[in-house]
Amino acid sequence: MSYREKQYGCDSTLVWAIAALTLAGIVMVFSSSAVYAQENYQDSFYLLKRHAVWVLLGTGLLVFARKFDYHRWQRLTLPVMAATFLLLLAVMVPAFSKEVGGARRWLTFGGFSLQPSEIAKFTVVLFIAKSMVKRADKLKSFAYGYLPNLIVLGIFFLLILLQPDFGTAVIISIVAFLMLYVAGIRTKFLVYSVLAVIPFLITAVTGAQYRTRRILSFLDPWSDPSDTGFQVIQSFLAFGRGGIWGLGLGDSRQKLFYLPQAHTDFIFSVIGEEMGIIGTLGIILLFGILIWRGFTIAAQAKDLYGTHLAIGLTLLVGVQAFTNMGVAVGVLPTKGLTLPFISLGGSSLLITLLCMGVLLNISDHSVRR
């Protein structure tokens, strides 16, 4: 055991990656939101101060989860699932939630809001990890090893889709299917499920005009440059202006009301404009380190539950991070997803740091082994 492992009692490389990404988030939230905040709230620090509150709360959650024996999550899975289910139902009630852009995804508490679909990500990972241990000797059976997982996943998928939050529903499904595949579920079960759901997905996309327009603008942003393709084109311009070294921290032009959601969904574009290819590669490297350490922790976990849980938590952050970056560079259609650690978004940051705390606790147990 190295000196640093003794000092932290966990994976020190992962700790530094988490710290670096969180710090990058603080810097970039201020850089990308200052002008917007001044225009809308008459205080350029307004969104930074809100983000700082979430960072402090998230750090507290991380510290708590780091000390909380991860085996307890196995026993708490059903209560957490029940609470998440109720929150997903509550968000559909106008008295408890707020509507933004035609979607009801947030429960309101005074001046703050909570996004239950973010909690659902963590909940589904807990459930799949517990289920894979419980059904370890039945994974090749469709009825006992696979179907119960599919039913639970389907319920959460539909509740999130009704908000509507198609992007989060897809991320949860991808992570869950990858967890099931790694656990040893028959590949044909997963393939048949994907094939069976394709008609439903096509209906979901074509049944909502805004989703159809997103797909069309993804295929050819310049076919509608002033509307559906506008966001992606502005993102391209940001990366193009940034070049290799960037314009300099704080000097983005696209954040001056050209690039929508510059401090949330498209913050990676601002990083590219201000810090250049070097800056974006640095962020990609940090996420790569996080994923590497997460899978290493999974391989070294003291038990099967720790392995499945570590895989799920790592995938949760990794899949969303690279999906967000893929949207920013135009290789994926827009989905309305934050960049973990970095985008402004309290619920996302809280759940991300909670996941990292649990991952560090799994690491702590494996180091002591």
Image (cartoon, rainbow, N blue to C red):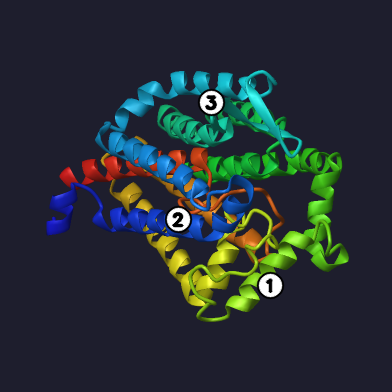
Please name whichever residue, 20 or 182, is drawn nearer the observer in this view of the structure. Answer: 20
Q: Earlier in the sequence, mark 2 or mark 1?
A: 2
Residue occupying the far bottom of the picture: 244
What residue is pinned by disc 2?
A: 25
Please name whichever residue, 11 or 190, is drawn nearer the observer in this view of the structure. Answer: 11
Q: Earlier in the sequence, mark 1 or mark 3?
A: 3
Amino acid type shown at disc 2: Gly
Disc 2: CA contacts within 10 A as few (<14), some (14-19) or many (>=20): many
Disc 1: CA contacts within 10 A as few (<14), some (14-19) or many (>=20): some
What residue is pinned by disc 3?
A: 110
Disc 3: CA contacts within 10 A as few (<14), some (14-19) or many (>=20): few
Amino acid type shown at disc 1: Leu
What residue is pinned by disc 1?
A: 237
Element class at badge 1: helix
Element class at badge 3: loop
Q: Are marks 2 and 1 in contact (CB under 8 Å)?
A: no
Q: Is residue 212 above or below residue 255?
A: above
Residue 209: give x, y in percent of width and height.
86, 44
Element class at badge 2: helix
